[in-house]
Image (cartoon, grey):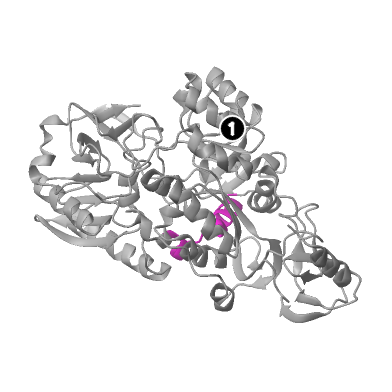
Amino acid sequence: MRTTQDLQACVDVALRRRPADLLIRGARLFDLATGELAHANLALAGDRIAAVGEGYEGRETLDARGLTAVPGFVDAHCHIESSLLTPYEWERLVLPHGVTAAVCDPHELANVAGRAAIDYFRACAAGMLLRLQVQIPSCVPALPSEEAGARLPAEAIAPYARDAALAEFMNVPGVLGGDPDALAKLAAFSGRPIDGHAPLASGDALNALCAVGIANDHETCSVPEALEKLRRGMTLLIRAGSVAKNLEALAPLLTLTLCDRLCLCTDDRDPLDVRDEGHLDAAIRAAIAQGCDPLAVYRAACLTPARAFGWRGRGLLAPGHAADVVLLEDLAECRVAHVVCRGRVVGEAAFAARPPAPDDAPFRGSVRCRPLTPADFASRRAGGRAIAIAEGTLLTRDVPAEGDGLALAALVERHGGSGRVGLAWAKGFGLKAGALASTVGHDSHNLCVVGTTPEDMAAAAEAVRAAGGGFAVAAGGVCRACLPLPIGGLMSDRPAAEVADALAALRRAAREASGTPLANPFLALAFLPLPVIPEARLTLEGFTHV
């Protein structure tokens, strides 16, 4: 809420009665409304742009000669937990890449800890520099049959509808089948943006999803699927994540005709990929390299998501808009030189001025399964079908459990409930030896293991259990490397740089111990149990055809 003092300050700066709090001088401005590139100064008053033009003065000045100014980037859909970082550390990682706003769904931690996770993320958002819009998890667990650490029925989340929107609605069977709880959630949040999750939805089913108010989708993998969803009124979120990479397939749609219905998002992106490749800046760079019009791409990264989520005054470099500015050395390469967020130059001083991070103690000690032994991973219960994975997509295939490349996969209930273990065969991990384990297992986040021998699977599983959560590699019956994730079994309590280094070391250990060719084997493992994406998944029942 802007105060009368805020408004008066903008008027005074615009009319040159007083200097701007910060003057960005000499930049070439990329106007996303008209597509023009022209030199002008930006005069900031507090967290707003007060004026665009020449001749303004500033209490502080940022020399932007030789740079191009664009609005701050908006990540239209992300799960911060997938960065393996706390929200404050995630902000430190992505803000220098130009991300000044994001739409966040904390359903990963919510599947572990319920409403306490939502309140934690909202408390973090209140202290952060970038604008973090915390959506309310709609499906905890993802499907009613799942065993997560919490359950959030409609009555548990309805109070949040006063000031929040509904996160990705994954329970498509519940909507189509008329499940009362699913419909009650949609009704409670009607009139607010409702995020979708509708892989391969088409025809009558797609009509039904749109009819109940689901506004967007980030699971689209092909142009024909995308066009059908666009025709039905959906906004499409083009995903450039660490596992799911849909940008190349959907880039032909990023045109000036369609860009007002397209947004960029990361969904799930780990800290090593952000460090080495970038965040939304990497997606912008890739889209332009594929021949997309830069104006269409930057609109999808800045203006369209702001409009899609009802954020007035964001997405343009114009008076009254948020003082979120990214200064680029090169527009096509999206090389970020400086970031201004809420009118402040992003740097250590800005991060240090944040209030203390909210307490994460309630989310520790969340791995409560019993000790595991090789006997828990006997393959006789795995069945005759296998889950085939492929790099770059979350979609899987249901194939016969035969031929080369088979590994045993297990899912262990870890929240202190049933303690069940589901077994299935998996293909695509390329394991020649050893085992990998993870307490990140979308979306119920039970303990996942894939391996070549029961002894190695038990060693990897015991390593993450003893660490209070995390990733582990085992070979020869012993743990070779472990990355602890003690906060909910999902997030580290260490700085982003340390986590990125540890993840790089873990991946090296995985390649050396198991021979896996996958660039990101732990995220591939983490999505193996996700029961809301076709066509084969690992559940506590074992192999499941979705």
Q: Residue at x 58, y 53 (%)?
A: 102
State whether residue 262 is above or below residue 400: below
Q: Where is residue 211 drawn, in percent x and y?
A: 62, 23
- What predominant SS class does the magenta segment belong to? helix
Nearest the viewer among 398 and 124 is 124
Q: Where is residue 219 drawn, in percent x and y?
A: 50, 37
**276 falls in the magenta region:** yes
Q: Where is residue 465 drawn, in percent x and y?
A: 21, 54
Badge 1: residue crowd in 10 Å (few <14, some 14–19, many ≥20): some
- The residue that label 1 is drawn on is 188
Q: Where is residue 495 drawn, in percent x and y?
A: 41, 69
Q: Is residue 53 left or right of residue 324?
A: right
Q: From the image, which quarter does the C terminus lie in?
A: top left
Looking at the rendering, the stretch of residues picked out in magenta corresponds to 273-290
Q: Residue at x 60, y 25 (%)?
A: 212
Q: Secondary structure at mark 1?
A: helix
Q: Is residue 309 left or right of residue 525?
A: right
Mark 1 is on which residue type? Ala
**322 falls in the magenta region:** no
State whether residue 149 is above or below residue 172: below
